[in-house]
Image (spheres, rainbow, N blue to C red):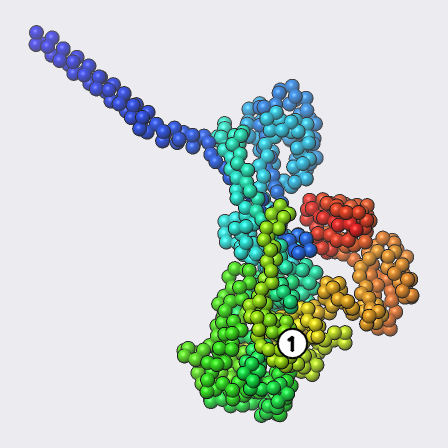
Amino acid sequence: MNVKRDIRFRVYVSFLGICLFGAAIILKAANIQLREGKELRQLATDIHFRTRSIPAERGNIYTEQGELLCSSIPQFDIHLDPTVVRRDTFFKYLDTLSRGISSILGKESPAYYKKELAKAYADSNHYFELCKKIEYHEFLALRDLPIFKLGKRKGGFIVETKIKRIRPNETLAARTIGLWRENAPSVGLEGTFDSLLRGVNGSMMVQKMTGGVYMPVEGTELEPHNGFDIVTTIDLNIQNVAESAMMSVLEKYQCLYGCVIVMEVKTGKIRALVNLGRDSASGNYFEKQNYALTPAEPGSTFKVATLLSLLNDGLINVEDNVDCEGGAIRFGNRVMRDSHLGLHVLTIKDAYAHSSNAAMAKLAWNAYYKNPEKFIHHLEALHIDKRTGIDIQGEPRPFLAKPGDKVWSNTSLPWLATGYGVIITPLRTAMLYNGVANGGRMMKPYLVSAIRRYGRETEHFEPEAEVEKMGDSSVIAQLKKCTAEVVISGTGRAIRSPYYNISGKTGTAQVADRIEGKWYPYSAGIYQGSFVGYFPSEKPKYTICVVVRTRPHAGTYYGGSLAAPVFRMISDKIFASDMGAWTAGIDSVVKKGDRSMAGKAATAAVNQELAQALGIHAAFPKENKRALTRISTDTNHRAELLRQHLPAGSVPDLSGMSLRDAVYLLEHAGLVVDVQGRGVVKTQSIPPGSVIVKGAIIKIQLG
């Protein structure tokens, strides 16, 4: 009996254990289903489904003339799902398809593609990778092949679009346009206007398939909203001229860096912004950093602010005399010296023209030594101590020494009057002289004139004055006399032009600075040579600021020798061409005046007809009448027709060409042509001489 009871007890205990275990399983299942089920189902979905972003097309950057500065071109990843294609259709066109793919992509043989496609079909590969990062014209060609032209659902043709950022003009204005970086901060206009340019990304669901690849789920796409376009004030022609002029001087003297700012006087629009720095390893120059926004002691170009303060207070007239005392005057325990000693009694205008530090320091000291705050207030009224507000991120804060500062001493005032003890950007200096050129109205500089979307303007930026009145008309007139005298008889006389008048100021400052991580003290002998001015003096149209930073202990470092020639090269090119829309220009053929003309590149036939109509006797070589040529003259005014050569792989000048000739040239070069209007070519969206980007769209306007 005891044995039976013992057996029954064990059976009951085992049965109870089984029941409890079963109950635990049921409870756990219920808990999973009711409490954790939603989370686990979502986890399972996440394993097999993902949301993939569809990038919005980033907006373009244009000039006001419609020329493309920066754009996004699509690149395509192509995958195939051969399982959706009927078997008889697939094998019927397999040979044709393989030959077509090989011909378009040019990477592998038709036999290779036939083998891979057949294998993908046999393996039921739903996401076979055909190619990645192909160009638009290649995508269009693939899309028209047999089977593929049936689309995604019947032909298994799966397309994923990606965006690549390009600059058709390569390095031209590269630092100003900036750089877009997907996983790092963008710079330049790309950075400042990133929130507008980038648009809003779309999305789509992708499902994990056999082999671990993901395939888009039909009907889940959320379309992206493309970015806005921005229109810059940069003029590509002026930019190109300014960069070439600066490059020639930098390479000649092996300077550390240089910058050029070309500003439209009436509006403050920046028409060119060049920033060329030297690579210490290769010795080459490129758009390295924004030197136009790099603060430094300006030197003598700052004297215009000192003169303006004295004139506004009614303390001087520029025809008054000042004794330069031989070019060396003691202030406290320091001596202010001119770069060239020997100047004595001069008019203030002449002292300014000859850049006498001693004279300017003496005038400021006599006027403000008892109350230097008054001088500081004048400088603050010119916003010397404020950022310019240009629409590029990262502008440093300027520095202006003031009474009460740790750096202020009894000798600070005379040195401040000559451009030391103040640290400002070249752009601020350009604004000062632009204000003088504009009759005392200092304009705020800007680089973007409009925002567009889908070709329609959504926002327009008007010119804005930062300082409405720098001084009354008599004050500005006296300043203009001084700046004109610099080029007539002063330190800028070497760039005086027989064709138009230039006004401005040279500047030379010894600087201490950190360049490429290395500190250069004053003893290193690095100078900043500058020239800032405007032209034509009577009716100023452009202000140009040129700043050049020399190498240590350079033999040539004066602003009149380094920077002023760059100014003249730029102003000559602008004045001699139609860039400035002048009523009369430099005569590039015979002589100047109202009967002047500028010789531009044209076909041999056109130039021959032009010369005959003007009665110019020129030697015309026997060559193709459609060859690009220009009329040139020697010192005896004898004209000849010269072949105009463009570098290989560059965009030709289409001006005056027929549509047939223009389209032939462009399509032969690999460009996609968009034609508007009738007649001959008037304008083109990609400037002549630009490097050809295969597949890029060029718009030509006929008229």
Looking at the rendered structure, the number of numbered marks drawn on it comes to: 1
According to the image, label 1 marks what residue? 504
Q: Residue at x 54, y 66 (%)?
A: 388
Q: Which residue is drawn at 67% across and 62% down?
A: 239
* Residue 251 in sight in this render: no
Image quadrant where one finds the N terminus = top left
Res 288 quadrant in image: bottom right
Q: What residue type is labelled 1?
A: Gly
In the displayed structure, 264 sits above or below 198; it is below
Q: Where is residue 326 in the image (x, y as percent from the top left)?
A: 59, 92
Q: Where is residue 413 in the image (x, y as percent from the top left)?
A: 49, 83
* Residue 545 in sight in this render: yes
Q: Where is residue 48 in the image (x, y as percent from the top left)?
A: 45, 30
Res 614 quadrant in image: bottom right
Extreme residue in the top direction = 1
Mark 1 residue element: strand
Q: Nearer the viewer, residue 164 or 265?
A: 265
Q: Nearer the viewer, residue 450 or 191?
A: 450
In the displayed structure, 67 sits above or below 488; it is above
